[in-house]
Image (cartoon, rainbow, N blue to C red):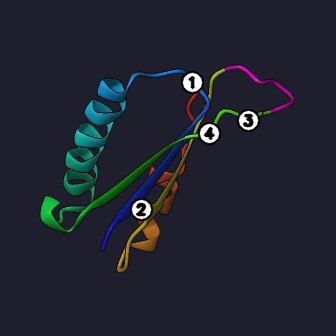
Amino acid sequence: MPTLKIQSNAPATEEAWDALITAASRQVAEMLGKPEGYVMVIAEPTPRMAFGGSREPLAYLELKSLGLPEERTPEFSVPVR
């Protein structure tokens, strides 16, 4: 089962988290070519996070999926700033 875990210290409403989960589920299914019915998305507000010494708003995403083609790993691992 493809699983996307999202952690972020950015303030957001429950409605914003719900919209993010819905969009992320659809996107993961499309990216992996799998039915959305098998996709799990976990979203966690995590207030204490830092990257590069900065506490500016950030997100950490972790994608796991059985059978993920190794040659596509770099495509899914590009950092975004």
Q: Secondary structure at mark 4?
A: loop
Question: The residue under label 4 is which amino acid type?
Answer: Thr
Q: Position of residue 77 (x, y in %)?
A: 53, 51
Q: Which residue is mark 2?
A: 72
Verify CB contact (< 8 Å) between mark 3 and mark 4: yes
Q: Residue furthest bottom?
A: 67
Neighbor class of circle 4 (other Cα within 10 Å; few <14, some 14-19, many 20+) is: some
Question: The residue under label 3 is which amino acid type?
Answer: Arg
The answer to which of marks 4 and 1 sits earlier in the sequence is: 1
Separation of residues labelled 4 and 2 (CA atoms): 28 Å
- Rendered residue at 81%/24% (across/down): 54
- Return the mark for residue 48: 3
Dot in front, 2 or 1: 1
Verify CB contact (< 8 Å) between mark 1 and mark 3: no
Q: Position of residue 72 (x, y in %)?
A: 41, 62
- Return the mark for residue 10: 1
- Residue 23 visible in the picture: yes
Q: Nearer the viewer, residue 58 or 66?
A: 58
- Return the mark for residue 80: none
